[in-house]
Amino acid sequence: MLSNDLHIRQLMESANRDRAAGRTLDAERALRQAETMAPQHPLVLNDKAAKRLLAGDPSGALSLIERSLKADPSNPTSWLHLAAIRRKLGRDDDAMAALDRALAIQPRNLYGLLNMASLQRAKGDVRTSAATYRTALRSIPANAELPPEMRPLLQDARGVIDENNLELETFLETRLKTLRARHSNERLERFDKAMQTLLLKRQVYRPQPTFLYFPHLPALEFYDRADFPWLDSLEAATSDIRAELLGVMADGAEGVVPYMSLSGPVADQWRELNNSRRWSAFFFWREGVANAENLARCPRTAAALEAWPACDLPGCSPNAMFSILEPRTRIPPHTGVNNSRLVVHIPLVVPPDCGFRVGSETREWKPGHAFVFDDTIEHEAWNNSDDWRAVLIVDIWNPYLSQVERDMVSALTAGVADFYGDLPAYVRPPQRED
């Protein structure tokens, strides 16, 4: 008996796979075999009920699905079919009860949640419907491949959520207006971002380092510029630094190398930029090693860098360079290696239509105005202009690490290198605009 049940389930699974792949004849062959072997099996009855419903016979489908559930009340798909049949028969309250049973068995069932939201909306409870739709969308795994028939359902769900969020935003702004006015002299940026996240206007990004995640550090996209007073001297030297950059470029860009230089298999996101001058760099320091020749060619930049509190990670940092992005070039979204360090940009040459995104926050470069960001949060850059763009990039310690913690992270990085004989790719990844 058990072996027969297992065989029927295997046949039904095979039929479902064939049907999803478009192999209709193979699917029907497996279904006929299962029906011949066990016409009263709950999965067979379930499939027959679904076909009856599609054929426009909800009453006949109801009899079959009730027999299926009597034999096996633990199958959430059967409860979903019962809900669809009852709804077709105009029994919305009973359909809701069936969906409750399905979701009690499988709380993140996407079809169940979408149908529950649809029923709530039909009954006029739009706000509850929007909340259920939101739960449904959150239940979808990242990079999940959904069948085409799901697309209009998801589009409808997003429309309901967006409409509800607009109403909620108007309601909250009215509710908070007096309190905002009372605190008009206070900084509310963090609160505003929290509210934008609640209203789904801002996506949540978290550090995803490719090598080392140091816990209990703030997950900030951009750090407060005021926390880095040493940047004043670098910003003050912007004109001198830019002049030396222009000199390097005027000399035929000798010493400027492709930023990406990969050997072996190359991920699709980097294939276009690998070994390409479309994205290039003039290094002063590279993975902890000074480039004496380049420093000598740019003495005023070298002098300005003396104020830079470099990050010391053997084989990885410090890094300091001119990063040059050619016209009509985009650096794809990516993350850095280690959130115990941060990255600084000092914009030098910035034509129009250039931008930079870290997580949910997008900024324009402004020549001479530095910013500090966590490169382990997904970020990307673009130059949509007809001229090249250049920034000075340096890396620094995350200020929330103590000196002892910095020493330990440096020793850890060196230890990994000694263990492997060199830093492996996941510690010292291909050059990228971090």
Image: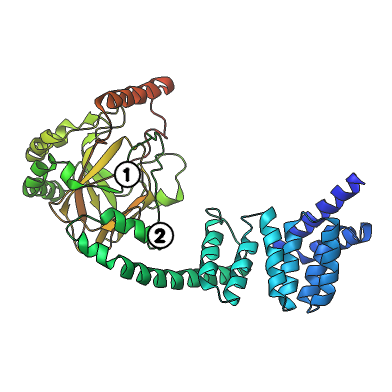
Q: Give the foreground label among 2 and 1.
A: 2
Q: Where's residue 23, x and y in %?
A: 75, 63
Q: Where's residue 211, x and y in %?
A: 40, 34
- Residue positioned 37% across, 45% down in the render: 335
Depth check: 119 or 417 in front?
Answer: 119
Label 1: few (<14), some (14–19) or many (≥20) C-alpha neighbours in 10 Å: many
Is the residue 93 above or below the residue 344 in the image?
below
Quarter that holds the C terminus = top left
Label 2: few (<14), some (14–19) or many (≥20) C-alpha neighbours in 10 Å: some
N-terminal of the pair, mark 2 or mark 1, is 2
Colour scheme used in the picture? rainbow
User: For residue 331, which numbered disc appears in the image?
Assistant: none
Which residue is under mark 1?
A: 375
Q: Where's residue 411, x and y in %?
A: 33, 22
Which residue is under mark 2?
A: 198
Could you say which quadrant of the image residue 121 lies in? bottom right
Q: Could you say whether the residue bearing mark 2 is in a helix, strand or loop? A: helix
Q: Where's residue 225, x and y in %?
A: 18, 47
Look at label 1 and name its amino acid.
Answer: Asp
Is the residue 215 above or below the residue 370 in the image?
above
